[in-house]
Image (cartoon, coloured by chain):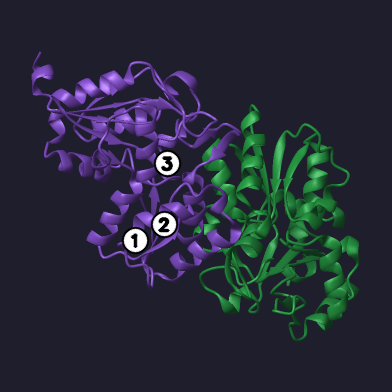
Chain colours: A green, B purple
Amino acid sequence: MQWKTSIKGFLLDVTGVLYNSASDGIGEVIPGSIEAVKRLCEKSNVRFLSNESTSTREELHKKLLKLGFSIKLEHLFTPAPVSARYLNSKSLRPHLLVKEAVEAEFIDCNRKNPNCVVMGDAEECFTYDALNEAFRVLQKIDDPLLISLGNGTYILTLFFGKFYKRTDGPCLDVGGFAEALIYATNCRHTVIGKPSPEYFDAALEDMGLDSGSVVMIGDDILSDCGGAMKHGLKGVLVRTGKWKNCPNGRTTRA
Amino acid sequence: MQWKTSIKGFLLDVTGVLYNSASDGIGEVIPGSIEAVKRLCEKSNVRFLSNESTSTREELHKKLLKLGFSIKLEHLFTPAPVSARYLNSKSLRPHLLVKEAVEAEFIDCNRKNPNCVVMGDAEECFTYDALNEAFRVLQKIDDPLLISLGNGTYILTLFFGKFYKRTDGPCLDVGGFAEALIYATNCRHTVIGKPSPEYFDAALEDMGLDSGSVVMIGDDILSDCGGAMKHGLKGVLVRTGKWKNCPNGRTTRA
């Protein structure tokens, strides 16, 4: 009962909790989730915490509206905008290796004379030339820093989250490419996305709540629940999304 | 004196010892090296041990002849042909991620239904699609094996050999891309090239000599000299090539 009364807010993962990805690029609503979100939002403080970095926050928001969710844009957290705020707060000037559309998220960042590299799930933009360009930026910096959007930490990804599945098959995610740059430059590496504490903090701060009064609901036992619980939140694992589909890798992105 | 009389053969690194790379794709002979090679070959058993994997052995041989070296093709070792023999000896069927020209080195290998991935310095062939294809091959195998051509081991490359320099700037080598695939698949990883023992063995076997009677001469204190000495050979470090140019990375390939 103590548990119930002390909870003031919820963080919800998106893919695998609200909807499942599908080949049409839109996906399918998970039965009951629209109603559940509605009820939660009526009674509690709710934020949506996704690790999506192949599209912009606006694009993901539009997709959720189209699927029938009633969610405010400002309540949806994706790694790129959080990363952009983090960069500005630390006077970091990023060299970007992200999909072209996602560059728009960094419009307020100073990108001249970069002092770090920010990398997302760039997919076909991971060319040898683009990777070399990022590598050369890091190589020129005294204490090089790589920020990657949404991949798990190495230890966690020994078990989960080392790749993701698209309709055409499993695909390398940003984590592998981060390893390549770390190998070549010995750079420091920061992940903005679950399960990083800074990412949970961004949502908690926006809610005005401390970690002890918030529950994270997700389908990834490590990035969602493990990351949240390590940071003092409570974790609830749903039996949809990747929990159901894939013991050995990410079936969904976020 | 004991040292002098017990030596019956020499292994020579190629780039940085015989010639230096240059923007014309041919390079410049290192002064005195043509005569030194000639004298060594007259009096001793000599093999040339390169880590080159962007071109075929034949292409490298032609380059050396053009530069004025008198070297037999069969005395020149590069990782791809050694790897092809290794694959056949172990009944391994490779999926190749190498430059197109280098595929010819594997003409005698069975490439149907691959049970390993062989990766060289594929440069612009390291596309997202090509890397995903290699990843998917590894993912389907029960005990996945990645063989990479010529990159150093992780511990060694903490200090050296994590990238190489082209005339347009430093470039990611096969090592970083190997890390990406290892991260995503937890595959086993074998390196064919210096400093791997199998690579030294291939040359020693061809000379009919044991390691104690052979000297490795190279410009890389770890891959050449360290690798050789760890394997029972003697090591001599020349003060040309990468020794001279670059304390923090490979200036040359092999």
Return the x and y of residue B202 as percentages of the image width and height. 22, 44
At 63% from the left and 35% from the top, the residue drawn is A136
- Gap in angstroms between the C-alphas marked 2 and 3: 26 Å
- In the rendered structure, find residue B154 and report the number of the disc placed on it: 3
Q: Nearer the viewer, residue A151 or B153?
A: B153
The chain ID associated with circle 2 is B
Question: Which quarter of the figure is the N terminus of chain A placed in?
Answer: bottom right
Q: Nearer the viewer, residue B197 or A56?
A: B197
Return the x and y of residue B150 as percentages of the image width and height. 39, 43
Which three-letter amino acid code belongs to the residue tagged 3? Answer: Tyr
Which three-letter amino acid code belongs to the residue tagged 1? Answer: Ile
Q: Earlier in the sequence, mark 1 or mark 3?
A: 1
Where, by quadrant of the figure, is residue B42 drawn?
top left
SS at mark 1 in the image: loop
Can residue A121 be seen at all in this image of the molecule? no
Whether label 2 touches label 1, CB < 8 Å: yes
Q: Is residue B19 above or below residue B205?
A: above
Where, by quadrant of the figure, is residue A101 drawn?
bottom right
At 55% from the left and 53% from the top, the residue drawn is B126
- Gap in angstroms between the C-alphas marked 2 and 1: 7 Å
Q: Residues within 10 Å of mark 3 (few under 14, many from 20)?
A: some
Can you identify the residue that label 1 sits on?
B107
The chain ID associated with circle 3 is B
Can you identify the residue that label 2 sits on?
B103
Q: Horizontally, is A41 left or right of A157 in the view?
A: right
Extreme-bottom residue of the structure: A31
- Pointers 2 and 3 within a single chain: yes
Between circles 2 and 3, the one closer to the viewer is 2
- Gap in angstroms between the C-alphas marked 1 and 3: 30 Å
Which three-letter amino acid code belongs to the residue tagged 2? Answer: Glu
